Amino acid sequence: MNSYKEIEGLGTGTLEIDALNLGCRFNGSAIEPISMAHELHAWLAQDLEQHGISRTQLEEATLSVAVNLVRTSKYQGPRGSFYIGKDGKPIEKGEFFQLDAECRSLVRTDEARYECSRVHQEQWPVGWPET
């Protein structure tokens, strides 16, 4: 899921994705769905179909992400990870974004709630991917 540039534009705050109805909010305000929302919406539709579950059986399918995004002058991600620039070479210098994301998902029917949480960290070059 490549929403790097969209997340850069949003910055730090709370991102809410409605995967069932393809909606997004950032800090409580409606925004255009980011790429990740489209991918989650498509995945959910496919998964429901594969398991013979009608979309109408779900009342809610959401992802809430507390996004903390900071710029740093040094790559501090996992060893062996790298990003390729449009020149085909690894990006080793320059500014990077560091993302700390606290994710909470919820799938709800009229009979049950399924919840999960996860902490995710990632780092990428400012402006990546280059176009």
Image (tube, rainbow, N blue to C red):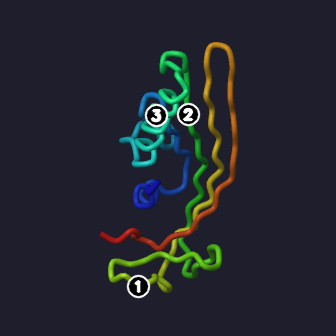
Residue 73: quarter of image: bottom right
Mark closer to the chain start, 1 or 2 = 2
| Residue type at tag 1 | Lys
Q: Give the structural element (helix, strand or loop) at label 1.
A: loop
The residue tagged 2 is 62
Label annotation for residue 115: none
* Disc 1/disc 2 C-alpha distance (Å): 37 Å
Q: Give the residue drawn at x 52%, y 44%.
A: 15
Q: Give the residue drawn at x 70%, y 43%.
A: 117
The residue tagged 3 is 46
Q: Give the structural element (helix, strand or loop) at label 2.
A: strand
In the depicted structure, whether residue 69 falls above or below residue 46: below
Q: Give the residue drawn at x 45%, y 54%.
A: 10
Mark closer to the chain start, 3 or 1 = 3
Residue 113 x, y percent position in the rendering = 68, 24
**Labels 3 and 1 touching (C-beta < 8 A):** no
Residue 51: quarter of image: top right
Residue 14 x, y percent position in the rendering = 56, 45
In the depicted structure, whether residue 17 falls above or below residue 128: above
Residue 67 x, y percent position in the rendering = 58, 53
| Residue type at tag 3 | Gln
Q: Give the residue drawn at x 67%, y 14%.
A: 111
In the depicted structure, whether residue 131 falls above or below residue 44: below
Q: Nearer the viewer, mark 1 or mark 2?
A: 1
Q: Quadrant of the C terminus?
A: bottom left
Residue 69 x, y percent position in the rendering = 56, 61
**Labels 1 and 2 touching (C-beta < 8 A):** no
| Residue type at tag 2 | Thr
